[in-house]
Amino acid sequence: MASNNPFWKELENAPLGTEKSLSEALDQLAFNDQGLITAIAQQADSGEVLMLAWMNRESLEITLQEGRACYWSRSRQQLWRKGESSGQVQWLKGLRVDCDGDALLLLVDQQGPACHTGRRSCFYFDLNGERLEVVAEPVVDPNTLYK
Amino acid sequence: MASNNPFWKELENAPLGTEKSLSEALDQLAFNDQGLITAIAQQADSGEVLMLAWMNRESLEITLQEGRACYWSRSRQQLWRKGESSGQVQWLKGLRVDCDGDALLLLVDQQGPACHTGRRSCFYFDLNGERLEVVAEPVVDPNTLYK
């Protein structure tokens, strides 16, 4: 959606290859009133959408520095290096920002399943006009992930 | 992430094909305190992630009924049938819900570009440890989208 922020507005017409410094970009990202921004994780080669999580500025900086996804856990209120306890690491292959600076897309190489249930993707329910249906099975036993 | 809601918790171990009614599922979705849930739009055949937007319960019901994406515009505070003024309609091919019921993934057939700038995807900036860079160009002149 169109942004009211002149930083993103001006870039709409910028030619391919136009650059801004990392620090300037981070300053202009539209973190919400809790200091968070949505982050989609997508398997870089297959295109499968794996999960949606949240980042604060610190977790985003860590992600870029370490080359692996680090989120902000809203339930635990702490940094969450994906896979630190389960081995489900997401190696960073690329990171995209959207047109109004309020969403991130992480292109990752997911080690093992992304979902805490042992399923490859967290999006394992299909919803249509009549029902919700389980449409994917665990690829590993979730009991082997968290010990 | 693991949900505290017993509805989603129980379904973690449910066999493939397990179903719940639409109304029960809608009642259990984790809309935030503004009544909204994140919705990712992905091109169904290519896997390209096109945009991230928000839905309330009404816009989700409209999406399922009409077979095209309808979001809730936070800036305009109204229902937003994607493409109603621009022709950038997203025909619905499938809709997924994640493990804790707080994110949606729409599989769509995007008509024309998804982005208001005329780019195919809204995620047209690359961010790395040094800079933000424009990595996609408009496929149509945005002036032809909104008249």
Image (spheres, coloured by chain):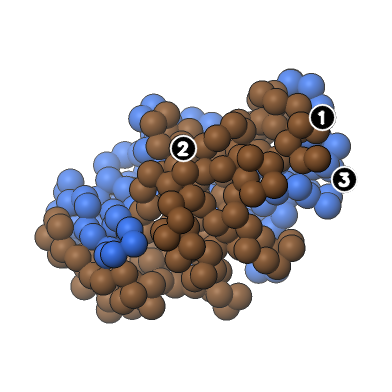
Chain colours: A brown, B blue
Percent across and percent down for residue B49 are 40, 43
From mark 1 to mark 2, how far is it between C-alphas? Answer: 26 Å
Amino acid carrying label 3: it is Pro
Q: Are marks 1 and 2 in contact (CB under 8 Å)?
A: no
Label 3 lies in what chain?
A: B
Residue at 19% from the left image edge and 65% from the top image edge: A19
Amino acid carrying label 1: it is Asn
Left or right: A110 as drawn, with respect to B88: right
Number of the label disc, if any, that sits on residue A63? none
From mark 1 to mark 3, how far is it between C-alphas? Answer: 12 Å
Q: Residues within 10 Å of mark 3 (few under 14, many from 20)?
A: few
Asked whether the viewer can see residue B101, the reply is no
Residue at 50% from the left image edge and 55% from the top image edge: A39
Left or right: B2 as drawn, with respect to A66: right
From mark 3 to mark 2, how far is it between C-alphas? Answer: 31 Å
Q: Which residue is mark 2?
A: A109
Asked whether the viewer can see residue B1, the reply is yes
Q: Are marks 3 and 2 in contact (CB under 8 Å)?
A: no
Q: In terms of secondary structure, where does tag 3 sit?
A: helix
Q: Which residue is mark 3?
A: B6
Q: In terms of secondary structure, where does tag 2 sit?
A: strand
Percent across and percent down for residue B17 are 74, 20
Label 2 lies in what chain?
A: A
Q: Between disc 1 and disc 3, whose residue precedes?
A: 3
Assign the C terminus of chain A to one quadrant of the image: top right
Percent across and percent down for residue A38 are 52, 59
Residue depth check, mark 1 versus mark 3: number of the one nearer the observer: 1
Residue at 55% from the left image edge and 35% from the top image edge: A111
Amino acid carrying label 2: it is Asp
Label 1 lies in what chain?
A: B
Q: Which residue is mark 1?
A: B13
